[in-house]
Amino acid sequence: MDNYIVLIKDIIKTVKKAYGIAKERDFTIQKKSTNEDIVTSADIEVQNYLCTELKKLLPSSGFLCEENHLFDNNYDYTWVIDPIDGTTNFSRGISDYVISVALLYNNMPIAGVVYAPLKNYLFSAVAGHGAKLNGKRIHTSNKTFNNALFCTALSLYRKEYAEVCRDIIFETYNKCNDFRRFGSCALELCYIAAGKCDLYFEIRVFPWDYAASYLILKEAGGILKGLNGETLSFNKPTALVGANNVENYKMLNAIVNKYLTKLPYTESI
């Protein structure tokens, strides 16, 4: 465990250097699966840099990355990387995007870094050692459900799921304080970890979107699970239900289960 505390410092240095690649170069934009699902040349360059440098930190390690279908997870240690979570925000000059890196050991996160460079937010966590924002310990809020801020989305890449998301959002909205949509799953989960927001639901999210922020939220006292309380496995897309505490998680999960009892997809990575 002490080795991971040393390692997290090297991960943070690497992630910060990776941002230099994104900010110093012009980028091009390409469409992936839909008009809404895009990738920039900065995503690719940041990912390539991270893979090269992180491999040096742990030579016997694999990767699970968003871009270019880089799935090499036949190792005890696996890096899960989203080079830019919130690519649309990044491409439009909106500050709500992050670089997200998690280290898994036997498919469980043991270290995580989420860096929002334009906001100067560096979230980090090592399993069993708490979560930090810019080096200071953070904890989820003590907000009750009726005072909670709810982070969510309408299934951007699969708009056929928007109707059920709408129903969940509408009922939750009427029972909580308000909702927010920042456009980056990793950032939103870190906001819950830091007590800025309190509830989370999204119907279809990939491991690179949440692996690092899952650990940060957990170490900050929060809860994040799959549909019907499923333990997250970090090897497939899933729905996410999260909250600042157990009571609020149970209330949100009950609303989600009212409209969604099983995932409307059976995908693997």
Image: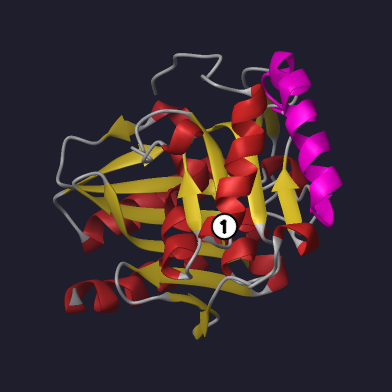
Residue 39: x and y in percent read 63, 33
Q: Position of residue 170 (x, y in %)?
A: 83, 35
| 82 sits left or right of 233 in the view | right
Residue hosting label 1: 247
**Residue 161 drawn in magenta:** yes
Q: Residue at x 34, y 32 (%)?
A: 235
At numbered mark 1, what does the secondary structure look like: helix, strand or loop?
helix
Give the farthest residue toward the bottom: 136
Instruction: Give the number of callouts.
Output: 1
Q: Is 233 on the left-hand or right-hand side of 218?
A: left
- Specify how the rendered protein is coloured: secondary structure
* Three-letter code, disc 1: Glu
* Any part of residue 55 in sight: yes
Q: Is residue 21 visible?
A: no
Q: Classify residue 189 by image quadrant.
A: bottom right
Using the image as rendered, state which of residue 186 and residue 148 is in the foreground.
Answer: 148
Instruction: Tell me residue 210's x, y (percent).
Output: 49, 47
Q: In the picture shown, does residue 243 fall above or below 13?
A: above
Magenta stretch, overall SS: helix
Point 70% across, 64% down: residue: 144
Which image quadrant is residue 167 in? top right
Q: Is residue 131 magenta?
A: no
Q: Nearer the viewer, residue 202 or 230?
A: 230
User: In the figure, residue 99 lies in which quadrant?
Assistant: bottom right
Q: Quadrant of the C terminus?
A: top left
Q: Quadrant of the N terminus?
A: bottom left
State whether residue 41 is above or below residue 24: above
Q: Residues within 10 Å of mark 1 (few under 14, many from 20)?
A: few
Q: Which residues are magenta?
A: 155-179
Task: State the residue at coordinates (44%, 38%).
Answer: 229
Q: Is residue 231 left or right of residue 75?
A: right
- Image vertical order of residue 133 relative to residue 159, above or below: below
